[in-house]
Amino acid sequence: MENSRQIIAILVNNQPGVLSRISGLFSRRGYNIDSLSVCATEDERYSRMTICLNGTLSTAKQITAQLEKQEDVVKVMTFDHGNVALRELLLIKLAVAPEKRGEIVDLCTLFKAKSIDTTMDSMMLELTGNTDKIDAFIATLGSYKILEMARTGGAALERGNKVMAESEEEK
């Protein structure tokens, strides 16, 4: 079986220690997490985790089965890549001489990135998009001196009207 990017969304009880227990499950079983994003949901009782990893569909199914056994896990979903909206955020700071700023502004226009801070010798840029777009932007900026960057894990929602949280009728 071929490894590919697997996206798993987990609805968990909003309790201290849940993140540690979930990430510990991955490490105990030798699975590497490529990215992890945790956030509040529309219901304060729950948090949502989005975990991306490189593995087979079989590996994702094994992980899903293990996650479903966890006490604080309410629901687990694996996403079909064609039916998911996944976005990451990149903040990147470049060393840029004033005469080179026009080139950076052109790249920002091409990638729909924003300049959020400019000093005499640097620029900080923001870009939101899918993993491939973020990777391509970083690669394009490779000829400039990257001073620092921060990148979030992916946040993902399934397209369409299906939702992860339980409706009142399901409870």
Image: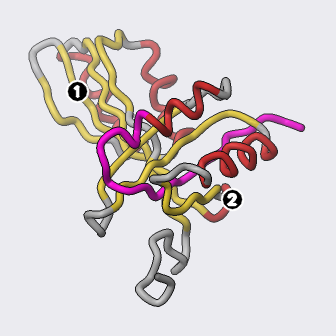
Magenta segment includes 128: no
User: Which stretch did the figure color magenta?
Assistant: 1-20
Residue 168 sits in quarter: bottom left
Q: Is residue 53 left or right of residue 58?
A: left
Q: Where does label 1 land, which residue?
A: 124
Q: Is residue 165 above or below residue 9?
A: below
Mark yes or no: residue 23 visible: yes
Residue holding disc 2: 80
Residue ranking furthest to the front: 71
- Horizontal arrangement in the rendering, residue 69 relative to residue 22 (left or right): right
What residue is at 74 percent from the left and 38 percent from the top?
4
**Circles 1 and 2 in contact, beta carbons < 8 Å:** no
In this view, the residue farthest toward the right is 1
- Name the amino acid, label 1: Met
Q: How far apart are the alpha carbons under marks 1 and 2?
A: 34 Å
* Residue sitting nearer the eye, 97 or 141: 141
Is residue 93 toward the left or the right of residue 127 in the image? left
Residue farthest to the bottom, as pictured: 169
SS type, badge 1: strand
- The percent position of residue 55, horizontal first and vertical second, equals 73, 35
Dot 1, crowdedness within 10 Å: few (<14), some or many (≥20)? many
Position of residue 48 relative to residue 148, above or below, is below
x and y percentages locating residue 6 in the rendered image: 66, 44
Q: Residue at x 38, y 13 (%)?
A: 144
**What element does badge 2 sit on?**
loop
- Which quadrant, please, contains the N terminus? top right
> N-terminal of the two: label 1 or label 2?
2
Residue 165: which quarter of the image?
bottom left
Residues 29 and 109: in front is 29
Amino acid at dot 2: Asp
- At 67% from the left edge and 40% from the top edge, which residue is drawn? 5
Q: Which residue sits at x=14%, y=30%?
A: 117
